[in-house]
Image (cartoon, rainbow, N blue to C red):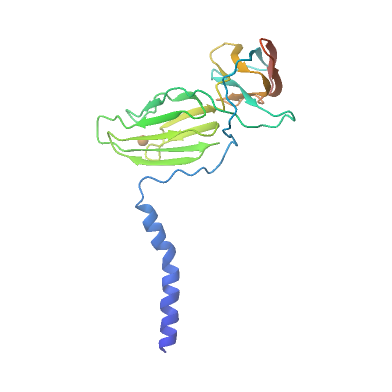
Amino acid sequence: MSRWFTLFALLTAVAALPLLLVSVRGERHVPKPVWVKSAKAQSGDWKWSSASTGTVKGKVSFSAKRPNQPMVVYLVKVDDAGKVTTQGQHAVPAELKVSQKGAKFDPGFAVLTRGQDVTFENDEEKEISHNVYFLGDIELDLGIFEQGAAASHTFEDYGEVSVHCSIHKRMDAKFFVAPNPAYALIEGDAETFEIKGVPVGKYKLLTWQKQKRFKDVDMPVEVKDGAIADLKVEMTR
Ligand SMILES: [Cu+2]
């Protein structure tokens, strides 16, 4: 009889274990950052600033009416075989501060550079808590923070980030994290771009659109010392 009781007690304990773990997890207010998905950026010894640089410029054309939304033209370093390789070390822009006043992320759109810090400040005048979580190429939850508190994150990977708050469903923002400083933001009715000071080497020119209306471009570019690579970037549907 006592043997059956021991077995029963053991089974109950095993069954209760997940519940116990869930409750412990629920008390953890600031989840440890974990990369769920990676855009496969790597840092390496290769330095972005170099004595030998060239320029990549071009004109973007659109096969249909273009939405009044920003797009980014950016370069990704590739090896001789054309495969994405280490993106190297580069100077990182200053931290971006994002306000959350009135349950609104401000700025609601930004282009960042890999390695850049972003601080979300809960600068509400009332006692309102906010949460920040990311979806997209970079997925992460920064937890919930009260009025006066802040949450920071360093973007060590590149790609698209949709920023949300689990408390306020309408609170959102969009970031694009460029892999290196070689990018151009194209806004309004601008159709040209120029990226100067690109270290010589082989790259891929890629596009990113905030509103995805066209097929993104993926074309090879070679940057030569003191030269200008002049490209036609055709956005088709
Ligand atoms: Cu919020």
Dividing the image into four quarters, tell me where ligand 1 lies. Answer: top left
Query: Who's the residue at 68% across and 28% down the image?
Result: 78
**Does 46 appear above or below 190?**
below
Residue at x 32% of width, y 32% of height: 122
- Residue 15: horizontal and vertical position, in percent? 44, 69
Query: Which of 61/2 is in front?
Result: 2
- Tell me if residue 189 comes above or below residue 101 in the rendering: above
Q: Position of residue 210 (x, y in %)?
A: 55, 25
Direction from residue 116 to residue 97 in the image, left or right: left
- Which residue is nearer to you in this view: 183 or 185? 183
Above or below, 25 relative to 3: above
Q: Position of residue 60 (x, y in %)?
A: 65, 14
Number of numbered tags placed on the structure image: 0
Question: Which residue is situated farthest in the right direction here?
Answer: 81
The residue sitting at the left extreme is: 126
Left or right: residue 176 compared with residue 141: right
On the image, which quarter does residue 67 sit in? Answer: top right
In the image, 18 versus 203, the foreground residue is 203
Q: Quadrant of the C terminus?
A: top right
Residue 61 lies left or right of residue 14; in this view the side is: right
Viewport quadrant of the N terminus: bottom left
Image position, residue 54 (x, y; %): 64, 13
Toward which corner of the image does residue 232 lie, by quadrant? top right
